[in-house]
């Protein structure tokens, strides 16, 4: 029960992906949806983006991370996890905020998919124009 006081919860979002992140003091283990980080994110670039906040703040290996992520694609989920981890690190120590803020990791990316309009093929693509 004493360990529960050290748990920090945060939420990260990107596109339609939502990641709920738990930050615990530990050895640097990361579990995503009950699977290891390497198993859930097989792409190196996704894992690199997730671990960026730790490398930037030099806190690698100090915290265990448990993540529940849903919605969106693999890339959006990785960015949502990164956003959640950054927010949790700031909650754990306010001195990390300037470095994470400067790197842009605390800002939620507001870009979303634009809806398809009627009379168009996609959101903006028009049907081919025929002069005759």
Image (tube, rainbow, N blue to C red):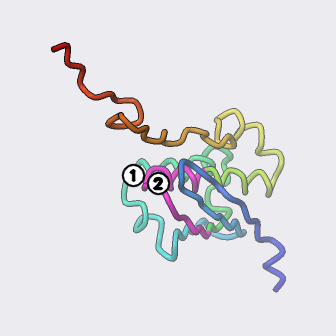
Q: Where is residue 19 in the image (x, y as percent from the top left)?
A: 60, 61
Q: Contact, CB < 8 Å: mark 1 with mark 2?
A: yes
Is residue 44 shown above or below 3? above
Q: Where is residue 2 in the image (x, y as percent from the top left)?
A: 84, 82
**Which residue was labeled with disc 1?**
44
Q: How crowded is mark 1: few (under 14 residues within 10 Å), some or many (20 or more)?
A: few
Q: Does the magenta stretch include residue 106?
A: no
Which residues are the magenta region? 66-82
As helix, strand or loop, the secondary structure at mark 1 comes to helix
As helix, strand or loop, the secondary structure at mark 2 comes to helix
- How many marks the image carries: the answer is 2
In the depicted view, which residue is nearer to us: 64 or 101? 101
Q: How crowded is mark 2: few (under 14 residues within 10 Å), some or many (20 or more)?
A: some
Q: Does the magenta stretch include residue 69?
A: yes
**Which residue was labeled with disc 2?**
47
Residue situated furthest top in the rendering? 131
At a point 54% along the width and 56% down the height, the residue shown is 17
At a point 50% along the width and 56% down the height, the residue shown is 77
At a point 81% along the width and 86% down the height, the residue shown is 1
């Amino acid at each position: 029960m004493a360990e529960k006081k050290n748990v920090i919860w945060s939420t990260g979002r990107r596109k339609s992906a939502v990641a709920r992140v738990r930050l615990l003091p530990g050895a640097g283990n990361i579990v995503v949806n009950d699977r290891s980080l390497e198993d859930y994110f097989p792409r190196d670039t996704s894992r690199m983006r997730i671990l960026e906040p730790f490398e930037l703040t030099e806190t690698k290996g100090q915290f265990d991370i448990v993540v529940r992520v849903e919605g969106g694609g693999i890339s959006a989920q990785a960015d949502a996890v990164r956003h959640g981890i950054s927010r949790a690190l700031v909650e754990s120590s306010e001195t990390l905020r300037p470095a994470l803020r400067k790197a842009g990791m605390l800002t939620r990316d507001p870009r979303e998919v634009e809806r398809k309009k009627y009379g168009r093929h996609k959101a903006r693509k028009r049907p081919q124009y025929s002069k005759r």
